[in-house]
Image (spheres, rainbow, N blue to C red):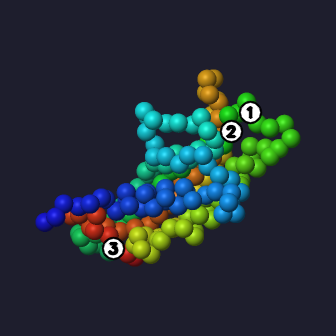
Amino acid sequence: MPAPTKPHSELIIEAVMAALKKINLADGYFTEPKLVQRYSRNTRDTTDRPVLIVMEGMESRELRGGSSDFWDSDLAIHVTAIVDPAEEEPQTGPYTDELVARLKADMLRVLGNEVDWDGLRARFKRVEARNFILDDDEDPEDGTSFYVIVEYSHSIKDPSVALAPS
């Protein structure tokens, strides 16, 4: 049996990251992230803003229809969007809350239009978001946590074998 290429969840995350990288002012978006990167403790770079940091979040799984061959999964892809250092919010706007709202609108637009969900055999189910202020004395930051909930199915024996969600 050939070795699996990648778990289905990784292909979905890669597609989401590729879509997020397409957000730019020239294509009519409100914002232009300076960097879209996968989460890493060692290489987190938030010096240029806005920055989008992507990581696999919670995942729930249940057997498809009592079968023992496929998992039906809900995958939460966590996108942390850091907009501004808290101490550098402009005095006259656009204010951090406006920038976060624009970035959320851009992320929704790009995920709805630039990801081939059918080709991935996945379904863009919903988004959950909350704004934040990180009160780190050395580097306070403002932004949003964005959870992209994706429904997909894969083989129990080989997580690279995808099946359309039920």
Q: Which amino acid does label 2 sit on?
A: Asp
Outermost residue toward the front in this view: 26
Q: Residue 64 falls in which quadrant of the image?
A: bottom left
Q: Sequence-wise, which precedes: disc 3 or disc 2?
A: 2
Residue 27: % across, % down? 66, 63
SS of the residue under disc 1:
helix
Q: Which mark is residue 84?
A: 2
| Above or below: residue 152 compared with residue 44 | below
Residue 154: % across, % down? 31, 67
Q: Which mark is residue 137?
A: none
**Alpha carbon distance from label 1 to label 3:** 47 Å
Quarter occupied by the N terminus: bottom left
**Alpha carbon distance from label 1 to label 2:** 7 Å
Q: Which mark is residue 163?
A: 3
Q: Which amino acid does label 1 sit on?
A: Glu
Outermost residue toward the top in this view: 137
Task: Kindly identify the residue that appears in the image at 43 percent across and 39 percent down.
Answer: 40
Residue at the disc numbered 1: 88
Q: What residue type is labelled 3?
A: Leu
Tell us which disc is closer to us: 3 or 2.
2
